[in-house]
Image (spheres, rainbow, N blue to C red):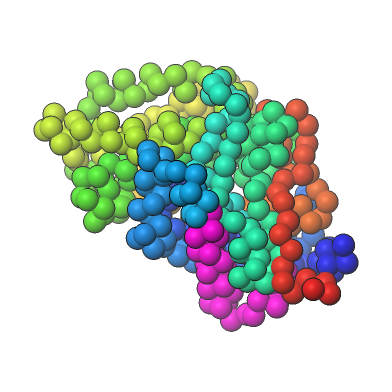
Amino acid sequence: MNWLDSIVRKKERLVVGLMSGTSMDGVDAALVRIKGSGMETEVELIEFLCMPYSPAIVKRLGEIESSGTIRDVCELNFLIGNAFAKAALEVIKKAGLSVKEVDLIGSHGQTVYHNPPSYGKGIPSTLQIGEPDVIAECTGITTVADFRTRDVAAGGEGAPLVSYVDYILFREPGAVRIAQNIGGIANATVITERVEDVLAFDTGPGNALMDGLLILATGGRERYDREGKIASKGKVNKGLLKKLLKHPYFFKPLPKSTGKEVFGMQKAGQLYKMVKSGRVLLEDMMRTLLEFTVESIALSYEQFVFSRWRVKEVVLSGGGARNLFLLERLRKRLSPLELSLSDNYGIPVEAKEAVAFAVLANELVSGNAANIPSATGAKRRVFLGKISVGVGAGNL
């Protein structure tokens, strides 16, 4: 284990965090300087980029849920591993550094299936692809990946895992904040003074339904509603919104998590049929889905948070935080609560999740358990991630 000792002995490390979410359109790569570990962790973002998947990978990922085979999953595991490796190498190059200067990669991978205990059906399980051995082989850098499975094995939801990092980044003595990420799925971390009291859960859909609908409506020419311009021209279909908010997920107790299996392309396809048939205008459906995201966030706070804590601030991150109309509607819905962006804390909204998995990789090699049982429902604190040794490690 001398190769690991050489990493652990360092007082600061350069770590690349890699993330691809439920949008399944590319890889976010963040190069981070990390000092210390645990509650003493200090994080500095050096460079960030988003590398789109090739059209072939996007197509195969889109097909995997409905018609994918075991062979497809196996091949995509390696193809996406290569895509993640390229993103890591590119962000290192963009920062003007060499791979020999980077100590670790933390890769979330690409979720293709998530069936947490709260679903109450089948065997609790989760699967992220993007083979870490491929990443380690292509980059030469020791890679930590497969973070979610251990929490699920310990009885947890396997999500949200970023709650541990949210606590490190945004905690303040005597204050309670909510870190709200709006990716494909939206998730919240209630950052309390004590880590033992932290709550985290998926609030419901983020951008996934809006993006999915627009992809279907434009034949893939447009993949998201830039700044919410289409939605801003529409009117809310109140009857449809009311129906959407009756989904059983919103009435489940904590802990809970969700994914594209519930609020993904299949659901977007059902909604698109209403647009295609002329029953609902595209801009009205987009506005209704935007309000669906806003309402599901606000109602989850009212259900699980506001009765227990006085919240000082909501810190927003994720691609949805760049949707200006979504922000406008969320600010109005949560008024007078203060909303800010993670940019204000030195982490661009697009980069936070990738930064989080860099931190989680650092926690594993530092010997620290990094799940929060009060957030995920796991029976105990566990170590997150598995290690693929880099080509340049130790005496190899």
Magenta highlight on residue 242: no
Q: What residue appears at the point 77 percent right and 39 percent down from the top-left corner?
A: 382
Viewer-proximal residue, 80 or 87? Answer: 80
On the question of residue 142 being in view, the answer is yes
Image-based side of 20 in relation to 197, left or right:
left
Q: What residue appears at the point 39 percent right and 52 percent down from the top-left corner?
A: 60
The image position of residue 92, as x and y in percent, is 59, 74
Viewer-proximal residue, 64 or 88? Answer: 64
The image position of residue 188, as x and y in percent, is 55, 37
The image position of residue 145, as x and y in percent, is 65, 53
User: Dividing the picture into quarters, in which one does residue 47 lie?
Assistant: bottom right
User: Dividing the picture into quarters, in which one does residue 221 lie?
Assistant: bottom left
State the residue lying farthest toward the left: 278
Viewer-proximal residue, 90 or 242? Answer: 90
Q: Which residues are magenta?
A: 77-103
Image position of 331 with respect to 295: above or below: below
Magenta highlight on residue 93: yes
